[in-house]
Image: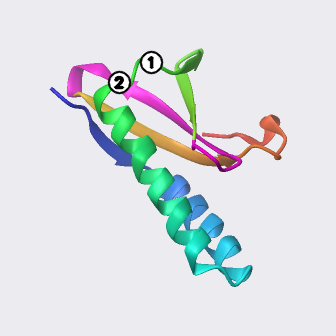
Amino acid sequence: MPYNILIEPKAKNELIDACQYYSSLDSETLVDKFLNAFQDTLSILEKHPFFEIKTGNFRMIMISKFPYALIFEIIEKDKIVKILSVFHLAQDPEKIKF
């Protein structure tokens, strides 16, 4: 049974920021590719949420071909993957706050 994906408001805002950045490069194609890669990553998490890197209660999965990772936690009893952040990998990891 697949897990449901819940995207926290902070992560939604970070996703919007990333799309706006790629759009500012005058590349709607790049925005589309980013959103497709994001959706592909969510599809992986729906089926295999325990597969990825774990630090404490948090896990991380890279977005293919882009310098972003999804930081998430799993609520196993409810079958939910909660996306906490769409994190740009050039940022200082100390900036991650939940």
Q: What stretch is highlighted in magenta?
A: 63-78
81 left or right, relative to 78: right
- Report the front residue among 19 and 59: 19
Identify the element where label 2 is drawn: loop
- Report the front residue among 83 and 21: 21
Q: What's under tag 1, amino acid-wise?
A: Phe
Residue 80 can be seen, yes or no: yes
Question: Residue 26: x and y, percent?
Answer: 69, 84
- Residue 19 is labelled as none
Number of numbered discs on residues: 2
Residue 81 can be seen, yes or no: no
Magenta-span inclusion, residue 3: no
Magenta-span inclusion, residue 73: yes
State the CA–CA distance, disc 1 to disc 2. Answer: 6 Å
Check whether the beta carbons of the residues at disc 1 and disc 2 lie within 8 A of each other: yes
Question: Residue 29: x and y, percent?
Answer: 56, 75
Quadrant in the picture for residue 18: bottom right
Question: Residue 94: x and y, percent?
Answer: 81, 35
State the quadrant of the C terminus.
Answer: top right
Quadrant in the picture for residue 64: top right
Q: What's under tag 2, amino acid-wise?
A: His
Identify the element where label 1 is drawn: loop
The residue carrying mark 2 is 48
96 left or right, relative to 85: right
- Quick check: 36 above or below 2? below
The residue carrying mark 1 is 51
